[in-house]
Image (tube, rainbow, N blue to C red):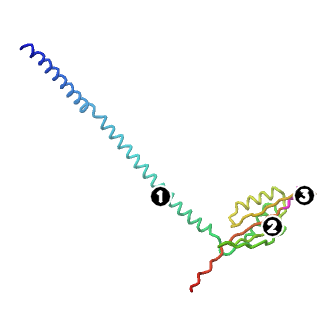
Amino acid sequence: MRKLQRPILVIDVAGTLLTAGIVVSAAWFSIFKPDTATSKMRVVAGELAHMRADLAQLQSLLDRHTRQRATLQQEAADKGRLTERSPAQHNLAAITGMAKKNGVRVLRVDPVAEVLYPNIQELRYRLETAGTYADHLRFLDEFEQSTFWSDLTFLKIEQTRADMLAFKPVRHGDLVVSFYAGVAREPAKKP
């Protein structure tokens, strides 16, 4: 029977050594290597702090853009509204001044038509002009940049005979300009 106890003793020693190895390994990783979990927690906490700071920045940026949008919408509502009465005479004076400033002479201004659309009135005027091609282009560029409620609905620029004294080719322009205004609505009648 003595031979049977030796293998059991070997198994007991092997089991004890295995258990001791597991305990030592567990102790090593839990006591001597605690930095892995703690360092990960510190990294996550740092990232969370950065994310909160970024979120605060984005929130303030969103608030600023929301205020800016409201301001721009109000300005657009104030500036973009059609007038109740067409300032055609004022606009024609401004356009002829714009033409003169750019070297274009306005030879003639004729009313062409008045067109009524639902809640909008269109007044069309025909302008005859004279000047060089470059002067016409500068005038048209400035007209395009203007803030009038107007539109150039027809444009024709032709070369006329050259002015021998001016030494530059004079071009004749024919333009139709439309001015727009809102039409006041009639109040609803009660029966």
Q: CA distance from mark 3 to mark 1?
A: 61 Å
Q: Is residue 18 above or below residue 67?
A: above
Q: Quadrant of residue 27?
A: top left
Tell whether label 1 touches label 3 (CB within 8 Å): no
Residue 63: mark in rendering: 1
Residue 127: mark in rendering: 2
Q: Does the magenta stretch mainly form a helix, a strand or a loop?
A: loop
Q: Residue at x 64, y 70 (%)?
A: 82
Q: Position of residue 7 (x, y in %)?
A: 13, 16
- Please give the residue where the numbered disc 3 appears in the rendered image: 166
User: Considering only order in the chain, which callout, 1 or 2, is on the residue closer to the N terminus?
Assistant: 1
The local crowd at label 2, few if under 14, some if 14 to 19, many if 20 or more residues have their Cα within 10 Å, is: many
Tell whether label 1 touches label 2 (CB within 8 Å): no
Q: Is residue 7 above or below residue 111?
A: above
Which quadrant does the N terminus fall into? top left
Along the horizontal axis of the image, is 143 left or right of 29? Answer: right
Q: Residue at x 53, y 60 (%)?
A: 69
Q: Quadrant of residue 172?
A: bottom right
User: Considering only order in the chain, which callout, 1 or 3, is on the residue closer to the N terminus?
Assistant: 1
The local crowd at label 3, few if under 14, some if 14 to 19, many if 20 or more residues have their Cα within 10 Å, is: few
Q: Residue at x 14, y 17 (%)?
A: 10
Under mark 3, the amino acid is: Ala
Q: CA distance from mark 2 to mark 3?
A: 23 Å
Magenta range: 167-172
Under mark 2, the amino acid is: Leu
